[in-house]
Image: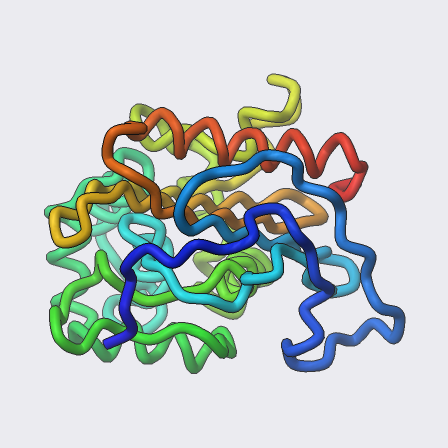
Amino acid sequence: MVSLHETPQPAHSTVNAASAPPSPSASAPVAPLVRVKSPGFFSWALLNRRTREVVGSANLAEHSDTMSMVKVWLAADYLTQTNPDPDAKAQAMLRRMIVDSDNAAATKVFGLNGGIVTIERMVSVCGLADSAPDYQENRWSPTIVSARDTVRLGECLAEGTAAGPRWTEWLLTQMRQVRGEGDFGVRLALPKSDRAAVAIKNGWFMRPEDDQWHVACLAIGPAWVVSVLLRYPKRLGLGHGKQVCQEVGSDLLAERALD
């Protein structure tokens, strides 16, 4: 198992993801400046959906965990592998899992999808380089991922590989309708008129094993995908992670990186 304990990292340096697989674009991307800082582990990445170029923090390939963010993959895998013809009851379960971040629904879907093998399929289908299941815990919440892989997962969802032609738009619609405590992050940096077009799924948990908040933010816009991964001291509360995710969006927008 990859350790998820706090590792201090340069929070706002940038890199053009040279270690990632080659992108279709021949030109190297220019990393925008993210000014916000956070104690502990802080990583972010931005994928340009037109060029597939990825930029981000210097530690964009380092590991953290997904928590509820992985629920979007669980839904995609269920709709393509487990039950491609779900009835209204099954669709309602998936909707609760995404829109309201229902943990009981996620645990049920994880089991129906075969447990750990659903995460193995995520890594394979979406071509993720830094991600893996947590084999020791055999649960969906501690799925291992990097910021770089998180934007790749977002693009895998957005362009239809994850959920296929029948279910992609349905799944993105559920992500656009996320509400309640899970409605935070990058899209709140946008004008209200633009937020409805952004699909999101966030994860958050105060992990007792390291006494830190773990926060994961994913946002998919028409031309971009943004991810933010955080681990920071318990005393700062969930509000700190929500604010950092939103401010990363603000910084990227200020640099016009998401145009």
> Residue shown at 64%/56% (left/top)?
56
Which image quadrant for residue 30?
Answer: bottom right
Residue 112 in the image: x percent, y percent?
Answer: 14, 67
Residue at position x 13%, y 71% from top? 138
For this rendering, which residue is in front, 113 or 63? 63
Front-most of 68 and 163?
A: 68
**For residue 237, side relative to residue 152 (left or right):** left
Indicate whether 31 appears above or below 84: above
- Quick check: 75 above or below 39? below
Q: Count the labels in the image.
A: 0
Q: Is residue 45 left or right of residue 93?
A: right
Q: Is residue 174 above or below residue 240?
A: below
Residue 88: where, in percent of width, then height? 23, 46
The N terminus appears in which quarter of the rendering?
Answer: bottom left
**Residue drawn at (39%, 28%), measured in percent from left and top?**
240
Picture coordinates of residue 105, whole percent (x, y)? 15, 49
Q: Quadrant of residue 136?
A: bottom left
Residue 69, can we see it? yes
Q: Is residue 140 left or right of residue 197?
A: left
Q: Is residue 89 visible?
A: no
Position of the C terminus, as image quadrant, is top right
Q: Residue furthest top?
A: 192
* Image-quadrant location for residue 213: top left
**What is the image's colouring?**
rainbow
x%, y% of residue 40? 39, 47
Tell me the residue at 74%/42% (across/down).
258
Q: Nearer the viewer, residue 164 or 107?
A: 107
